[in-house]
Image: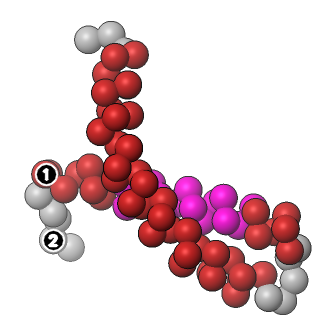
Amino acid sequence: MKKLPKKYAGVLFSFYASAVMVLIVSAVLVALNTGIDAGYLQRLLKSYLITWPVAFASLLGVRPLVVKWVAASVAD
């Protein structure tokens, strides 16, 4: 598999982190709100497809701020 240049590390981090976190949160919330039955996976997929782009874009936007907060919170 061909690797991307390091300059895309932040975007890839946001992509992977948002994908995993949205899947976990959506799975829990869909289960709590509608239960786990025959239509659970379909509802989960619908929720995921709606919320993942929002989470990805949000993470891209706030990542620089969070990086600054982390840098200010840890020793050199």
Q: What stretch is highlighted in magenta?
A: 14-28
Picture quarter with the N terminus? bottom left
Q: Mark 1 points at which residue?
A: 7
Q: Which amino acid does label 1 sit on?
A: Lys
Colour logic? secondary structure
Q: Residue 2 carries which label?
A: 2
Picture quarter with the C terminus? top left
Callout 2: helix, strand or loop? loop
| Residue located 50% across and 68% down the image | 52
Quadrant of the image occupied by residue 4 = bottom left
Task: Evaluate whether residue 13 shows in this view.
Answer: no
Callout 1: helix, strand or loop? helix
Q: What residue type is labelled 2?
A: Lys
Sequence order check: which comes first, mark 2 or mark 1? 2
The picture places residue 36, in percent across and down from the top left corner, at 86, 76
Considering the whole magenta stretch, tell me its main secondary structure: helix
The picture places residue 66, in percent across and down from the top left corner, at 38, 34
Residue 43 falls within the magenta-colored stretch: no
Evaluate if marks 2 and 1 touch, with contact meaning CB atoms under 8 Å apart: no
